[in-house]
Amino acid sequence: MPRAYDAIIIGIGQAGPYLARRLTGAGMTVAILERKLFGGTCVNTGCIPTKTMVASAYAAHIARRAGEYGVDVAGSVRADMKRVKARKDDIVLRSRSGLETSLKKLRGCTVYQAHGRFESPREVSVGQERLTAERIFINVGGRAIVPDMPGIDKVPYLTNSSVMELDTLPDRLIVVGGSFVGLEFGQMFRRFGSEVTVVEMSGRLLHREDEDVSAVIHDVFEREGIGIRVNAKCVALSPGDGEVIARLDCTEGAPEVSGTRLLLCVGRRPNTDDLGLDKAGVAVDERGFIIVDDQLRTNVPGIWAVGDCNGKGAFTHTSYNDGEIVAANLLDNDPRRVSDRILTYALFTDPPLGRAGMTDAQVRQSGRKALVGKRPMKAVARAVEKGETDGFMKITVDAQTREILGAAILGTGGDEVIHSILDVMYAKAPDSVVRRAMHIHPTVAELIPTMLGELGPLT
């Protein structure tokens, strides 16, 4: 006889815990199914561990630059990867353990530490048990894609998860993929002391960003001694003498790159292939993402998909927001929708990129008449004082409505400063609200009103 609950949550990423607390707070009984690590990608193999390691790499970088600030550092700067990993592991463990403990103590919530599979639209098996509920939420996340390229089965490779288990420094690291994950790891390991080559098949790094963003990141990476191969498709892999050799299909440069380690950063896929979705009748797209509507409902009434597995976002903040949207509709009589949110994200390289809304390319494609303001970071007093003048900030405004369409802050503090623009975008306020605001000096954000006072046509 199946054990009945009011709700079942399969997978404990970022949306799951929020939903569990909201549902139990409303008096429902909730079953949580987690087959491995509480907290999903963010806590275990994503945001928390990577940004912890980025912080260690930044410390090494600043230590090497200490002389520029009038500070003497005796001896060479060397990263101790065992200590870097131990620090990362400790922070991850504290975060994961705190979440696991809180959920196991949550009144009205039962935790099952096993894999869950659908047996029908209302029934889920977990181990030897069967559970049933009128509401089922899928929050199973995703994992790194391992491309099916010749030789992949003959060489050792790393993904975003396994690379963080290294406690020794690779002599020479090949990073396949020049987007967010690949660039963060590439710069990180270069600053730890590895030789790094980034291989990107498109014509530039971060090819979905505007060209000026790509150009700055390319320049920064080259100045830090990172090899960059664009227009280069990795078509085959083979083992060498203690090496991995990547053969490239490229328009310029050597046709082969060798390294002692290979890191694959070519995208992610949803963890939906072992859930029994066919037994529940839940529809997926050609890539395995669960198809949902604007309120995250699947095609089967009573089943929702939240987080990375629905293809509506690939960030912790979008996953958490998914949980908020579902709870608002179910519990608060508040018809929130995915389409109401403004796309925003950050690239946590140095300098970081904070992005909100549309790129300039997207604005042009929309056909809107727009105005743009831009300011180099070398003209920002705070950046000069910190000795971190790479990058720029820019903002785009609708020429008729005066609403802000998009912004990019590529520079020191950009991942934080972007929120001052994002909040005004959600308010649908005209750019004059920011332009007339008095900001604190000396900060990066104080130059946003200045940019808005110098708008010109977007060409």
Image (spheres, grey):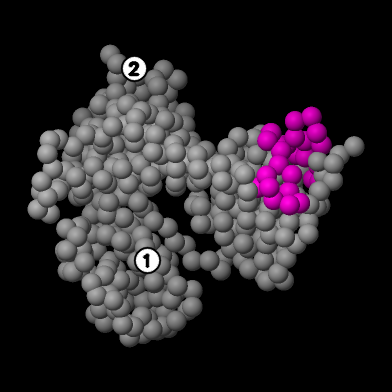
| SS for dot 1 | helix
Query: Is the residue marked by circle 1 packed among few (<14), some (14-19), or many (20+) residues within 10 Å?
Result: many
Pointer 2 residue: 239
Seen at 24% across and 75% down, the residue is: 441
Q: Amino acid at mark 2?
A: Pro
Q: Is residue 328 visible?
A: yes
Residue 363 is tagged as none
User: 339 and 233: which one is in front?
Assistant: 339
Ranked by sequence position, the earlier of labels 2 and 1 is: 2
Question: Is 373 located above or below residue 164 in the figure?
Answer: below
Q: Residue at x 62, y 44 (%)?
A: 101
Looking at the rendered structure, which numbered label has been put on residue 418?
A: 1
Q: Left or right: where does residue 382 sit relative to residue 10?
A: left
The quarter of the picture where the N terminus appears is: top right
Residue 253 image position (x, y, % from top left): 20, 34
Judge by depth and name the residue closer to the eye, 228 or 21. 21
